[in-house]
Each structure stands twice: as structure tokens, then as C-alpha cells.
Image (cartoon, rainbow, N blue to C red):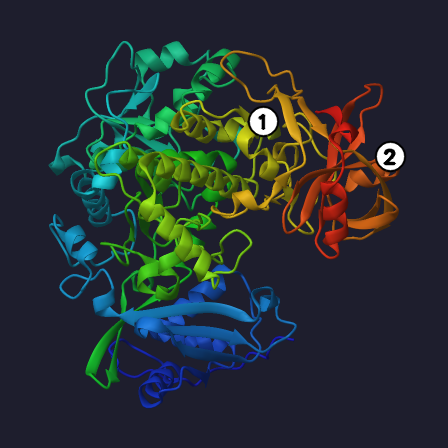
Amino acid sequence: MASELVPSHQEISGSTTRFGPLLCDYCQKIFSLLESQEAEQLKCDYHPTVCSLRDAAESGCRICLIYYDKWQRNDFGELWGRRMIEVSRQRHSVILLELYSFEERSALVQWGGTFHIIAGAPHNHLAYPGSSRREKVRKELVGYREQHYSPPNSTDSLQAWELCRSWIEICIKNHKDCRKLCPSGEWWPTRLLYVGNLSDDTLGDNNSSLIDVELHETRIKKPKGSYMTLSHCWGDPNKIPKLTMETYEHRIKNGISFRDLPKTFQDAIRLCRFLRSEYLWIDSLCIIQHSKEDWERESVTMADVYRYSRCNIAATASRGPSEGCFHPRDPRLVSPLEITLDTKEGKEKYLFLDNDMWNSDVEEAPLNKRAWVQQERLLAPRQIHCGRQQLFWECPETSKCETYPFILDFEVEFMPQYQDFTVKPPSLSPTFLELSRLGSSEARHNESPNCRFCYKHTHRDIHYGEYAVEDMSRIEEIYASLERATRDELVAHMRRHIYQDWTNIVEHYSKCALSVKTDKLVAISAISSRIWDTLEGTDEYVAGMWRSQLLSHLLWRPVSGKSIDESSYKTGPSWSWASSDAEISFRVFGIGWESEYASMIDVLSMYDGHTINGTNEPTLESPIELRCYLYQTRPLKETNEGYAEFYITAGKEEVELTVTEDSKACTKYWDHAFAIPIRISDTVEGIIVKPCEGRPGYYRRIACWLKMLGRERLVEYMGSRPDEERVTITLI
């Protein structure tokens, strides 16, 4: 039950406190206790009601302002309960302030009672002008004309855009790794919008910004410089301007009226002009809509559209074209929060940060919940995220924001206990970069060799395959082997990293929404084609899977409790994750453990009828021919969580399997299902299939299974079966 709201008599006097910024009595007490006590953890009382928190925030308390803003943005209403702040000291003098709930019934229980964390670190640990001890920071600061940025009250500001200009210039001039990842030579999309070249003295002129744009066919009007791209949510497709066969000639001849464009497009054009890019690519205006021929031609170039761009502008916070790229904000929520504490060494300045800032404003923003956007983000060499609160920067070497405009390496600065195990770039960039290095005289390896790649700042648990981080002896062994490895061995190692990238990308992609379900494989095809190019044709890509990795990829499963009503075989074959509209996950072994499982199948042939290739029509059937063992199953019981328990006969006894259903419709096939073991390691894993009616030898996957407890008998039995017992089947 939420606490009753009562007026707060909390007062905040003056404009500053001895800690620096304005703080309420509760927050001053927190920092006073932190100074006076050396305990690693402290618990402090906090505001008893939402009303009290709001009053403190409105009165100017910088800590309460962050917490109240988060509360409002999560739309928790008046729910509050008893709250405390838990203060914990981490390694490297990092301080965490955790707002904690004691209400067991609280809606916050999904976060284990934690509402929000503010992290602080000594100023000389951070990317801060004049104080940072980090060499990377000092190098990054070279080239900034202004090193004392003060966020304005809106991201629609030349001051904020000037920061974006510095980000791009410094990346192009100073980031060696980013330059290596950029493709060489010239390439342009089929069509580009020519937005013009305005002089500095007209950029802030509202009338000048109304200049119309032209639609250029690049084979006729060759661009004179680089271009930028726009990632955006379409919203209502009937309200977005489109290039069609009917409007094509008119657009080419007369251009496009700036006034007729939605706000998101207008904002992107204005920023593009400011950043000295005369060309912009927007999907709805550069691809002929409702033209099957043009779509098939343009869709296969998507990887190059983003790879060859100068920078991608992402309307990250906007749900549709009318919301724009830029937003007003309270600059106090964006400015660095400096707190001065008395320590044994004297007064020390700490900088505090909303540790969920990147996740809430970028990862969980409306744009990044769209499936098409994932490949746009992964393949663009640079990205400006137009968030609700501030502008963010992302490139293979660094991430930045208006709060920390020079470098934001959250894991290094605020979570040092994880820095050795985190691959920070949010894309395939580290792997591609490493492969390019291995092909040059600068061959080296500098990434954690067995870390599953994760998205920047999401702070997912770092793990190595199914092994705990504490299993350091194996990690050290892998590091040592890499030090002795030849160039070819390192190339092979990095190629294995690509496959781990792929499963991580697919897991994230499966959470995203698609307006047209049959675009499931098309919307990720630019990434798969990029990987295929990098692998130099040494592997086969079929319906979202890589042939060399089928032992892992066939074992995808819906995330617990998120199975769907029925699989769709129009989006992918039954054996591929693409047939499921659920969030899915893989059981992937960490690099270095591949040899510790045995294959129970042979892949005889594969055919991809679902992935559009050039102008070929998809056949909507992708057969894979397997030689495998086939065991009749007998259901034991069903549950409501997407799981079931089965028996199979193994010799003279029945063995129980734990099954994860692909969809809720699977239950009607249980009495005529078969288990196929795929691999044996510390567990036995496989899939459940059903026969296709009227097609002898053809099957569809309907579930996957796992045997852990008591697996020894099953491992012994299956490992001793003669090859003659295997049969040849076709999965579709």
C-alpha cells in the first residue's frame, strides 16, 4: 500500500551547501555520514513520501531532482512506501547511492526492491578537463575548441550542435581504430537528399532553414562530399512523406518542400546542414515505396548505406515523425553533479552520475525497440543519439554525452570491478577491427578473449559461456595461449568471436518490434551480409543461422514465460529462431570450450528459401537434411511456464527430459513427437520435432530439450549407439 501523501516541511536554504550544490537535509545527512564513517555500506533515511521528494526536487536539491525525474519518467504515480538510501563504497573510491524500497508489494519488486542508483567517482578518474589522470582522456581532449561545456535548456541549440561537430571532427582526425573500420573508396546510395550548403552566419537564421531540399539520383548527379543518414520511427505509415512511383518525377524535378516535411525530418536536415554535410539519406524519401523491384534492389545495399555514411543521426526518443529530434530539458539534470567531500587526504571532488542514463535514454528509448534500427546502429561508423534529456555520441572507440562530453567510459570510471571483462563497443566493431589489424603489421589482440559481447552501459552480468567469472584459471590459460598464437590462429579465434557476436545480436533483435512480420530476416540481412563478407565466404548463412555453428544455433529457445501462440513459417523455417515472434536466447559455450562437446548430428545439406537474395522470390521453405538419432517421446506433464516434462526410452529405462516449447500450439503434437539429440557436453541437449502430414521423412521443430540432472545414464547410452541406428530426415 502506498504511503499517505502529507505536505513536507523540508526546507533548503541558500543556493549552495558545504558539499557544493544545493542539497536537502536528507541528502546532506547522507554525505555527512559518508565522511564520518568508514563502513563499506551505510543505510540512511530518505523522504517519507513522493510529495516530500517532489518538494525537495523543486526547491533545487540536485540528488532529489535526479530521483524525482526518474520516478516521473517511469510513471509510478504516488506509489512510494518506506524508502532508504543505501550508500556503498566500491573499488577505486567509487560511491553508489541506491534508493531502496522496503515495500514487498511495491511495483518495484521486479528490480529486487531497488529503484535507482546514482554513482560517483573522484573527478580525476573521469574524462574531466584539467584533472583526469587517464592518458586516453588527455588524448581525446586534444582538438576541442571549448573544454568547459555548459548544457543549454534544449538540445535544439547551436551550442549543443557545436559539441556534435567536435565529436565528429575528433573521431575522423584522431581515432585510428575508427578510421580503420571505415571502408575505403567512394560509394553512394542510389538516391540522396541534397540539403544544401549554408554559411555559418545563416545557420541560426530560421528563414534560411526553410530552404527546400532536392532529390538527387547519384549516378546522374555525383555527390561532391559525404552524406549522413537518419534513423527514425515511422509511426503511422499513412502520415509519413514517401517517395512513390507517382511522385517520383515531380520530386526529381521540383524537389521537396521543407515546410511539408515532418519535424523529425526538418530537425535532421537542420543538424545535417550545421555539420557541413550537404547530403542526407532518409529511407522513406530515398527508396521508392510500394515498389517491389526498387525494394529488392535497395534492400541488399543497406549495409553499405550505413557503412559509407559520415554519421548516423538517430531520433532516439521520438515515437514518430512529428516528435522531432530535439527536446527541451532541465539543464540541471544534464550538468555534471559535483560533490566535495572531506577525506583523509583532504577535500576531494566527486562527480556523480545517473548510472541508468545511457540505458534509459538510449537502449530503452522508442527508436531502439524497433528491429530495423539495430542494423542501422551496428553498421554506421558514428552515431548521434538525440535522446529525451541530452545528445549522446557513439563510435567504435568512445561514447560521450553532454554530461560527460569528452569520454563516457562508464565501466572504467564507475564500475572498475568489471572493466577487465567488458567489451565496450556496442557492435561488431571490435571483431572487424581486430581482423583488419591481423591483416596488417599491427597484428595484436586486446579484447577479453572469452567475454560474451554485450551492449554498452546495459550492465548485464558478464559471464564466460556457462562458467563463472571467478573461474579465472581457464581465462588466464586462454590469454596465455593467445600470446603464443600465430597469425592464423588469431584470425580463427576472432572469427569465433564473430559467431558469439551474432548470437548476442539475435538475442537483442528478438526483443524488437517489426511492423511487417515477414521482414524478420530482411531487417537483419545487412548485418549477416557484413559478416559473410568478413568471413570471406568460408561459411554458409541460411535463414538466420551459420552452418558451422548449427550445434549451438539449433538450440535457440524462447525466454522463460514468453512463448507465443503459434510459430510463423512464413518468417523462417521451424528450426530457425526467425520462425518465433518471442524473445529468444541461445546456450552458447564460451570461446575456448568448443572442444568439450560432441556432435550427435551430421548436416548433409541446407537450402535457404526465406532470405531474399537479389530479385529471387523466397520459396518460404528452407529444408535442412540431417542424419541423426530419433527417439519417440512420451509427455509426462505440462506447466504454465512454457515448459513440459517428457520421457524417452534409453535402453531398458525411461529418461526424463525438460522441454521448452516453441509456442503454445505445441501441446497438440506431444503424442506424436520425437526427440533429436544435438550435442553432448556437461549436459545433453536437443530438439523435439513432429512429422509433417503427408510428407514422409519431413519434420518441423516444435521445442527444444535439456537433460542436466542424472544425465550420466543418457550420456552413456547415447554415446554407445551404433551409427546404423541413425536416420536421415528433412527439417523444414
> Picture quarter containing residue 538?
top left
Residue sitting nearer the eye, 183 or 13: 183
Question: Dot 2 lies on which element?
Answer: helix
Q: Amino acid at mark 2?
A: His
Q: In this rendering, would 334 be left or right of 597?
A: left
- Measured as percent of width and height from the top left, residue 309 is found at 30, 29
Question: From what the image shows, is residue 31 above or below residue 501?
Answer: below
Quadrant into which the N terminus falls: bottom right
Residue 468 visible to the viewer:
yes
Q: Residue at x 37, y 69 (%)?
A: 119
- Measured as percent of width and height from the top left, residue 508 is found at 52, 44
Q: Which residue is mark 1?
A: 543
Distance in Å between CA atoms under marks 2 and 1? 26 Å
Q: Earlier in the sequence, mark 2 or mark 1?
A: 1
Residue sitting nearer the eye, 463 or 714: 714
Looking at the rendered structure, which numbered label has been put on residue 672? 2
Question: Dot 1 lies on which element?
Answer: loop
Looking at the rendered structure, which numbered label has been put on residue 355? none
Q: Residue at x 55, y 34 (%)?
A: 549
- Measured as percent of width and height from the top left, residue 497 is found at 43, 41
